[in-house]
Amino acid sequence: MVSIRVPDDGVAPVVEKSKESPFKQGEYYVFDVEDDVARYWNKQSPARRAELAKQSRKEGRDIRLILDGFVHKPRHTK
């Protein structure tokens, strides 16, 4: 497990019931995630990260679930 840092914009992050709550560190919330999810997060631009955090609040879903959908896409078979 590694951590990702999501900027705090004054609104508390959405946390799934079965997930561990993030903690506040300066102006960021720190989430524990899997290694591959953290690698994906670190490759994104700051604008894209802000967009994902905004999407999380808008949909009312944990950001870890949104990132997991991008990282672990189901394979398409015919």
Image: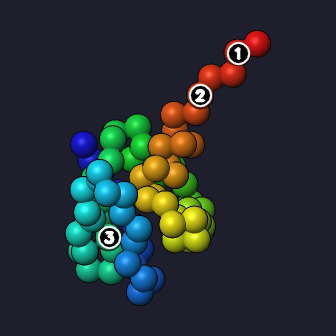
Q: Residue furthest bottom?
A: 10
Question: Mark 3: which secondary structure?
Answer: strand
Q: Earlier in the sequence, mark 2 or mark 3?
A: 3
The answer to whether marks 1 and 2 mark residues whose Cβ atoms lie closer than 8 Å is no
- The x, y position of residue 44, in whole percent, is 54, 54
- The x, y position of residue 20, in whole percent, is 24, 56
**Quadrant of residue 62 within the rendered picture:** bottom left
Assess disc 1: are there few (<14), some (14-19) or many (≥20) residues with their C-alpha within 10 Å of its C-alpha.
Answer: few
Q: Tell me, for residue 77, which label it has, or none.
A: 1
Quadrant of the rendering where the N terminus is positioned:
top left
**Of residues 28 and 21, which is closer to you in this image?**
21
Q: Tell me, for residue 74, which label it has, or none.
A: 2
Circle 3 is placed at which residue position?
29
Q: Amino acid at mark 2?
A: Pro
- The x, y position of residue 2, in whole percent, is 27, 47
Q: Residue furthest right?
A: 78
Assess disc 3: are there few (<14), some (14-19) or many (≥20) residues with their C-alpha within 10 Å of its C-alpha.
Answer: some
Q: Is residue 50 left or right of residue 29?
A: right
Question: Mark 2: which secondary structure?
Answer: loop
Q: Amino acid at mark 1?
A: Thr
Q: Earlier in the sequence, mark 3 or mark 1?
A: 3
**Residue 50 visible, this angle:** no
**Of residues 55 and 42, which is closer to you in this image?**
55
